[in-house]
């Protein structure tokens, strides 16, 4: 499976915005955006001209921010966009809801992982159950009423034991619920755009693909 293998923090610096791709590290002084806020390639102390973006460049930037945030390659992201286009309603809002419905994102939103990349790894390694069955495809879309839990064997891991002790302090979005004793989450309703703190402009993404 193809995946992004370059330094993750470069993506935030390139977009001049924290995308919170490394979980808890992004909230500490170790965050690259705090230590080196200039885009990659700029030498500290030498200034440099401020780059101007065309309309097309701004649209590309928003599309890339969406991809980076959810950890998707271009072909995967475009497939989700085309699916959003076919649905009734506003394409930008449909896109955001579909991205939030990905299994790896739901695992992250439930607090089972500190970042989406870590959540994707948990799913790929077979630790997560969807409706009681092991699912190792991070791009699986969840539905209203679905339950997300842990494989029995995974509950013996050191990671799970630490998580079970720290999960109480984590906040869960209101379209999800989590039993913090059994560590089983449920999709109470499909998310609405208002419930998601989007880091990108959905309208710009639509304009990018409409050309």
Image (cartoon, grey):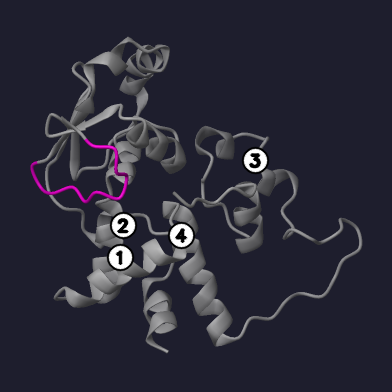
Residue 203 vertical placement versus 97 (above, below):
below
Q: CA distance from mark 3 to mark 2?
A: 25 Å
* Disc on the earlier residue, 3 or 1: 3
Q: CA distance from mark 2 to mark 1?
A: 8 Å
Residue carrying label 3:
31
Q: Tell me the SS state at disc 3.
A: loop
In the foreground, 107 or 90: 107
* Disc on the earlier residue, 4 or 2: 4
Q: CA distance from mark 3 to mark 1?
A: 30 Å
Q: CA distance from mark 1 to mark 4?
A: 11 Å
Residue carrying label 4:
73
* Disc on the earlier residue, 4 or 3: 3
**What is the magenta range?**
135-145
Residue 128: which quarter of the image? top left
Residue carrying label 1:
80
The image shows residue 88 at horizontal and vertical percentages of 14, 76
Q: Is residue 142 magenta?
A: yes
């Amino acid at each position: 499976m193809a995946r992004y293998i370059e330094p993750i923090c470069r993506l935030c610096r390139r977009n001049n915005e924290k995308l919170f791709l490394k979980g808890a590290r992004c909230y500490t002084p170790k965050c690259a955006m705090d230590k080196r806020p200039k885009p990659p390639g700029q030498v500290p102390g030498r200034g440099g001209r401020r780059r101007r973006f065309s309309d097309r460049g701004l649209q590309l930037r928003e599309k890339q921010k969406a991809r980076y945030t959810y950890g998707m390659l271009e072909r995967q992201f475009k497939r989700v966009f085309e699916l959003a286009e076919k649905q009734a309603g506003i394409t930008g809002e449909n896109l955001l809801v579909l991205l939030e419905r990905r299994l790896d994102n739901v695992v992250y939103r439930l607090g089972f992982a500190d970042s989406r990349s870590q959540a994707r790894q948990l799913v790929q390694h077979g630790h997560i159950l969807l409706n009681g069955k092991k699912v190792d495809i991070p791009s699986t879309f969840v539905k209203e009423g679905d339950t997300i839990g842990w494989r029995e064997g995974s509950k013996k891991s050191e990671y799970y034991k630490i998580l079970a002790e720290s999960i109480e302090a984590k906040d869960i979005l209101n379209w999800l619920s989590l039993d913090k004793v059994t560590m089983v989450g449920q999709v109470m309703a499909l998310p609405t755009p208002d419930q998601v703190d989007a880091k990108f402009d959905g309208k710009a993404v639509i304009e990018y693909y409409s050309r």
